[in-house]
Image (cartoon, coloured by chain):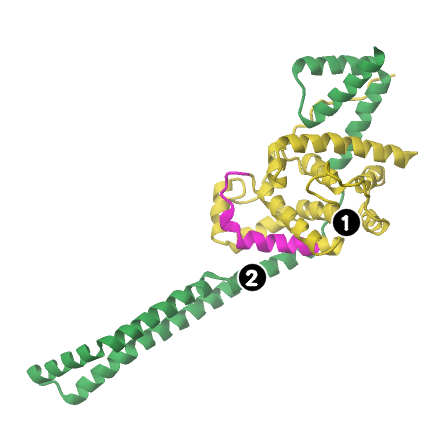
Amino acid sequence: MSTPAFTLAAAPRPLLFAGFMTDDTHALATGLRQRDPDLLDHLIEQYQQRLYRYLLFLTGNPPLAEDLFQETWIRVLERGSQYNGKSKFESWLFAIARNLVIDASRRKKISSLEELGDPESNAPYDPPDERAASILQMLVSRENEQSVQLSLLKIPAYYREVLLLRFSEELGLEEIAGVMATPVSTVKSRLYRGLAALKTAMTEGAA
Amino acid sequence: MNENLHERASQLLAESIVEGLRPADETWLREHLASCTNCAQEAAATQNVLRALRTVPVSAPRDLAARTQLRVRLRAQQTSPATNGSFWLWAVTAASWLLGVFSAPLVWRGLAWLGANFGVPKLALEFGFVLWWTVPPLLAAAIIVYQKALAAEWSNKN
């Protein structure tokens, strides 16, 4: 039997910026400080898929994800002067989005959003409800990847989030720690547990 | 013993994904995967999971970016630099008005001195005094009109 192709270490690929200015975080910071409307338009276009996907998988609620998407960019406009250009823009952007999700979850109970803060404390394993899963299921189009994505919906949000940031958004461990405002060790711990939870969910789904 | 090997392989597999491996561990894992069908299958399954995670096919609604751009531009317009500058304009206008009130007696005396020493007609002096009072608000009005024009330009640009 042949050995399946295997590549070690999933190192994040360098993020390619498609347009003007965004390859230079300091120029980006200057543009945000000046509230450059053209720059903001460009950034919204550039990050729309990644940000929406992140918000959708965190909330499990498309209308809420859309609202938070817009709120995130309003925050970027209003707090653009706080971005200093020393970190990646997407880390800053996801941190803003994450805080808005947490604020929204405090205002009203979001069915698919379990506690994002400390999964190891007392948070029970509580998969998202069928409604949220079915809404997301409708958005998943490729059949051969469906089982992974549906399994992703069955694991707690704090694992889902870290897995998405690492393997879908391809952020580094330190960057994820920055987004989540947690130590790198916590990020690693959640990645290990999240991968294990995902495998378990997939096994159960296949059974 | 074999169980330990498989367990180690499983641990290293997870480590390779999360943090990367030291060369010695990487070599050991490669050799183990080459000789162990079950672990190789687990590695392949893990890679499939990661591949699927990297390509989660969720698309943002088609008009979401456009709606967001519009909303951001409207907010930018509401809090544009021209609007922020209004505070300073009003502050300077108020200071100018106060200065005008308190300096009026001096100005009147100065105008009277001009009339006495240079024979300036009384009508001209009165006109000069009126100008002293009206020029600052006229200037302020001109600046406000200019600001509104800037705001309109900003709005059109956005």
User: According to the rendering, which colour does chain A have?
Assistant: yellow
Residue extending farthest to the right is A207
Location of residue A153 in the rendering, given as x and y in whole percent from the top left corner: 80, 42
Density class for disc 2 (Cα within 10 Å; few <14, some 14-19, many ≥20) is some
- Label 1 and label 2: CA atoms lie apart by 27 Å
Q: Secondary structure at mark 2?
A: helix
* Magenta residues (range): A66-87
Location of residue B95 in the rendering, given as x and y in whole percent from the top left corner: 31, 70
Location of residue A112 in the rendering, given as x and y in whole percent from the top left corner: 78, 48
| Residue B75 marker | 2
- Specify whether B95 is left or right of B127: right
Q: Which chain hosts label 2?
A: B
Q: Which chain hosts label 1?
A: A
Q: Are marks 1 and 2 in contact (CB under 8 Å)?
A: no
Residue B56 falls in image quadrant:
top right
Amino acid type at circle 1 is Gly
